[in-house]
Image: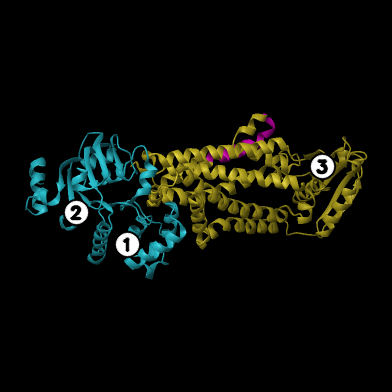
Amino acid sequence: MDDLFGEEIVRAEALKKTFTLSRKQQKIEKTTLTRKVAVDGLSFSAYRGEIYGLLGPNGAGKTTTLRILSTLIGADEGDAWIMGHSVRKEPAEVRDRIGFLTSELKLEGFFTPDYLFDFFGAMHGVEKSVLAARKQELFSRFGIGSFAQVKVGDLSTGMKQKVSLVISIVHDPDVVIFDEPTNGLDVLTAKVVTDFLAELKAMGKSILLSTHIFSLAEKLCDRVGIIIDGKMIEDGALAALCGGKPLEEKFFEIYRGVKGEIL
Amino acid sequence: MKIVALMKKEFHRFFHDPRLIVTILLPGLLIFLLYFFMGSMIHSESGREMRVYLSGDSAIVDFLGQQIEGRGDKVEWIPLENEEEARAEIKEGKATAILTFTKDFDLFGEDARVGLVYDSGSETGSYFYSLATSVLISVGMRFPIDVQTVQEGGNVGMEILTSILPFLVVTFVFSACMSVTLESVAGEKERGTLATILATSVKRSHIAIGKIVPLSCIAAIGAASSFFGVIFSLPKLMGIGFDVLFAGSYGFLSYFMFFLLILSVVPLIVSAIAAVSALAHTMKEASGYTGVIMIVVMVLSFVSLAADGLGSWAVAVPVLNAVISMGNILSGELVLWQALVSVGANLLYAALLVWLIARMLSSERVMFGK
């Protein structure tokens, strides 16, 4: 595998995650079951310099998988390795090597992008001189300089997402994990984000992203994994997986095969 | 470095937000204004005429007389001949008090005692009582003051200093700790900004310490504001002068231990509120839990009023130990080992809570459970 795809950067093996459902959640899910399997024996690998996309409908287990890989939550069973470090046994080592962007992680509205960049740089142990150079580079790349001293709470959604993005990679991680990175963004900001993902790939970074936007996956991803009900249904290079069909068509074909008709 | 950055962030959050600064300092100012004006209303009168029966002699009498006359009041010292008649006069409002000194009182021997009988139901009597007890405490010597009131209900005035003040101090400390900790821990958890820090490689114990230490410092500023609000308004409230309140009354060690006790309670309460804030999903839920802590702290403070009946085991009970030691200090009876053990015990409990918070920050169920 390594010879074919390059160095294995991310490896997930038989990940399983179960959540207890509250009564309220049982009502929403319309079930009497007290536990829900969010991720069910999920395995996949991602390689250096590629963009790997996790595709699936809402509730399929994409975000839960990324949260396990970023060590925010633990798997009930199985393990994953980021650059050889176990998310289960060496969470701090993993956190130093990844940049995680998700809507769940927010920035304190009271502080400015400038302050937060320095703060999170310190959290990752980035040297001050390196941090200053990186701030200049990233702020310039994303046009943050003009609002670097404005409190995050006063910024627009697009501006906030740009700030969140640069802060997630403040420590120049080798692995970038983005959960639905263009969700809720206007077309201009979304383009800035997708262009940057391509740039990161060109820099040799490994990128893992979850999305349900087929066009985004087709445009960016080298390989994709299709998750339905917490299970990895298909996993492979985009072209091989699609077999000449558009990704959207292929996805629904797979979906129907697993779930029957689309409701 | 990471822990320093975490602490700096908390300080930056506080010192760059005028609203938070006002929130933390305002109670002290309000307490001062409230007590000051209450005192002004109570002690607005001057020109009181006091008749005090005196038995024995002391230089303190002259000092007390100067204090009374310095406030525009008059005092007539009458030699005590018949105590029963004098008590009857006090009850009838014809006399203000009886002040008795043992023989050779000014030598401050082992037998030195002061007796004070007054009518706690009379404004002039209470005024004389506050002034006399403050002057007696300000002498700074250890001698028993035997206070009696001709009223059935007993006297409560002096308890402002010895019992109520420690209770007030703990209340102010709690209020200061609550206002900063809830926002910083429960607020950050609810808003998802704590999770962003948890996604970095910083140690959970560093996050806990990086919150508790600066929050304790900030809360200590708030507590100090309230404390000084009380201290500076007390003379007005009690109708006495600063000179009486501070004239060498307790000594440096007593003041130092008093502040040390306050400082030991601050991280303890901050840690306790931070722990329940980490546990809660929302600020609202955290406020509910904090209410329970507040009740526990208040009960412990009240229990201290019966401190005489408590054994030395009380020194191991958080908050209660500090309140008892503060009361002792204000009564001029500092028990150094007790105060030091109290400070140590409170800091130990705070450290245990910090450890617990670090465990909570590592817990997926606590931090990300729905």
Instruction: Using the image, determine if residue B352 lies above or below residue B246.
Output: above
Whole-angstrom CA distance, mark 3 to mark 2, is 90 Å
Quick one: A69 or A34, which is closer to the camera?
A69
Residue A218 coordinates in the image, percent (x, y): 15, 56
Split into 4 quadrants, where in the image is the C terminus of chain B?
top left
- Spatial distance from mark 3 to mark 1, Cα to Cα? 75 Å
Q: Which tag is nearer the camera, tag 3 or tag 2?
A: 2
Identify residue type, mark 2: Cys
Circle 2 marks a residue in which chain? A
Q: Nearer the viewer, residue B191 or A254?
A: A254
Chain identifier matching the yellow colour in the rendered picture: B
User: Between marks 1 and 2, how big is the CA–CA gap?
Assistant: 21 Å
Element assignment for label 1:
helix
**From this viewpoint, which residue is outermost toward the bottom?**
A146
Q: Is residue A117 left or right of residue A55?
A: right
What is the magenta range?
A: B295-311
Q: Is residue B299 magenta?
A: yes
Marks 3 and 1 in Cβ contact (< 8 Å): no
Q: Could you tell me which residue is drawn at 21 percent across and 50 percent down?
A: A52
Circle nearer the N terminus (1, 2): 1
Q: Position of residue B296 (x, y in %)?
A: 54, 38
Q: Residues within 10 Å of mark 2 (few under 14, many from 20)?
A: many
